[in-house]
Image (cartoon, rainbow, N blue to C red):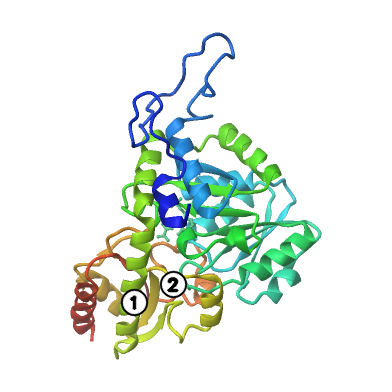
Amino acid sequence: MRFDTLAIHAGQEPDPTTGAIMTPVYLTSTYVQDGPGEHKGYEYSRTQNPTRKALQDCLAALEGAKYGAAFASGLAGTDMLMHMLEAGDHVIVSDDVYGGTFRIFDKVFKRSGLNFSFVDLSKPENFEAAITPKTKMVWVETPTNPMLKLIDLARIAEVAKKRGIISVADNTFMTPYFQKPLDLGFDVVAHSTTKYLNGHSDVVGGFVCTSRDDIAERMYFLQNAVGGVSGAFDSFLVLRGVKTLHVRMDRHAQNAMKVAQYLSTHKQVKKVTYPGLETHPQYALAKQQMTGFGGMLTFDIHGGLEAARTFLKTVKVFACAESLGGVESLIEHPAIMTHASVPKEMREKLGILDGFIRLSVGIEDAQDLIDDLAQALDRVK
Ligand SMILES: C=C(NCc1c(COP(=O)(O)O)cnc(C)c1O)C(=O)O
């Protein structure tokens, strides 16, 4: 089956007992056994749950993975992956990542003895230069959150394989609809399903998938042993949301392009970054490894923090809030909000400055979105 059909059907057979076409929500913690160890493949819902299995199988099919595991949040999936490593191991991370991802690396796992290097992997030569004899994993986002830098997945994967390094791509921004890191040689894909996969801002969740048997064995062990699993109802909601992923992503991308083009002409706007604009420094790579450009864009507004605050308080259709990827349009100030946990000097080196604004462009009427931005920009000048 092709992507659009998999999004609706993969991992979901009609319920064998009743024929229910939608996977039931198995709100149960445990399963009665015929005798000690004599069960139907289900023992305890932290270990296995039919609704979570349907979600795991569906999302794995969309990423082209053999195995998938669903978690209570994106960072719970990150936590599981870090438990694959041991004290003294070294991880190379793209220098621009979600603030919470930076935080779990720098404030949690560094205390457990893991070492992290935050490297500008948009320049592929920097990856090999950062490898040490202790390097066990490379972790990338592309496009990065929030600077929307792109990383050449195939080139990173090639070097990682040659050096025996596990490669992980956080594919939250693009989703498998626009980008397939496993097809480009990556070992693991991670998602915050909170975002585009669920797509309706009513779940916090995570997902990790791979086609490597060795990684999968460890992944399922840790999912159960560490326990940060996706609950049955959250799994049902993500399974329901992902059914329209292909339709929503097309509309997100169409709207984002229109908004990016509008902002690019506005005198109050200093710089617009969107992978679909030919002005993006890595536009050629965007066209090479992505089939669409997503719904995320950023821009710098003249007037610094005061202008940014006024602007974020004046928009009406765009909601000022953290997160992204829902049907509604969101706007936020990374330096104060999503990336406050990144040290100021690191933020400023990346370009996350006082006038820097991130948009998650929703699937509303594009002209309504543009009109909303226009009226708010008029108030700023
Ligand atoms: C909440 C936001 N990000 C969460 C996130 C996460 C963490 O996902 P959680 O479900 O919030 O734990 C992981 N990876 C990326 C690329 C993310 O953007 C945000 O950027 O507003």
Q: Label 1, label 2: how many angstroms apart (C-alpha)?
A: 28 Å
Disc number placed over residue 9 in the picture, else none: none
Residue, disc 1: 305
In percent of width and height, residue 361 lies at 32, 68
Disc number placed over residue 293 in the picture, else none: 2
In percent of width and height, residue 318 lies at 25, 67
In percent of width and height, residue 218 lies at 66, 39
| Picture quarter with the C terminus | bottom left
In the picture, residue 315 is in which quadrant? Answer: bottom left
- Element class at badge 1: helix
Q: Is residue 324 visible?
A: no
Instruction: Indicate left or right for 291 with 217 as reference.
Output: left
Residue sitting nearer the eye, 91 or 23: 23
Residue sitting nearer the eye, 308 or 359: 359
Q: Determine crowd level at label 2: few under 14, some 14-19, many 20+ residues with C-alpha closer than 10 A.
A: many
Q: Is residue 191 visible?
A: yes
In percent of width and height, residue 212 lies at 67, 47
Q: Are marks 1 and 2 in contact (CB under 8 Å)?
A: no
